[in-house]
Amino acid sequence: MEKKAVALKYEREKDGAPKVLAKGRGILAEKIVELAKKHSIPVIEDSELVSFLVSLEVGEEIPPSLYKAVAKVLAVVYSATRRGYPSG
């Protein structure tokens, strides 16, 4: 199965909803994950959600139908960030 990755951006004060910052498949997906880890950005694997998100355009807000799923991911990211991700 081809690897897919989507980077989201969300600033509560500025954005109405999270937006697609970057997306890719294969080697580009691997590069997105590599850059996230290099910059201590938590990486969450959810292949079902990514399959929906990768169909969006860069800069596009996620649709309301995905708010709940993305909110769960953001909660994990915020929690990891508060705990000082990465640990170790």
Image (cartoon, rainbow, N blue to C red):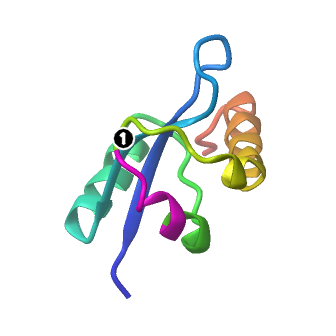
Q: Is residue 47 above or below residue 2?
A: above
Q: Quadrant of residue 11?
A: top right
Q: Which residues are magenta?
A: 51-57
At numbered mark 1, what does the secondary structure look like: helix, strand or loop? Answer: helix
Q: Nearer the viewer, residue 41 or 26?
A: 26
- The residue shown at (52%, 38%) is 61
- Report crowding for label 1: few under 14, some 14 to 19, many 20 or more residues within 10 A (C-alpha): few
Q: How many marks?
A: 1
Instruction: Write the residue at 44% across / 45% down.
Output: 7
- Closer-to-camera residue (60/27): 60
Q: Image point 59% across, 73% down: which residue?
A: 48
Q: Position of residue 41 (x, y in %)?
A: 50, 38
Q: Residue at x 73, y 56 (%)?
A: 69
The N terminus lies in quadrant: bottom left
Q: Is residue 41 magenta?
A: no
Residue 57 place in picture, x, y as percent: 36, 48
**Residue nearest the observer in this picture, 51 or 5:** 51
Return the residue found at the far left.
27
Residue 76 picture location, percent across and down: 74, 46
Quadrant into which the C terminus falls: top right
Q: Which residue is at the far top?
A: 13
Is 67 placed above or below 41 here? below
Q: Position of residue 43 (x, y in %)?
A: 53, 52
Find disc 1 in the rendering and name its residue.
Answer: 38
76 on left or right of 59: right
Seen as rendered, the residue at the extreme bottom is: 1
**What amino acid is labelled 1 in the image?**
Lys
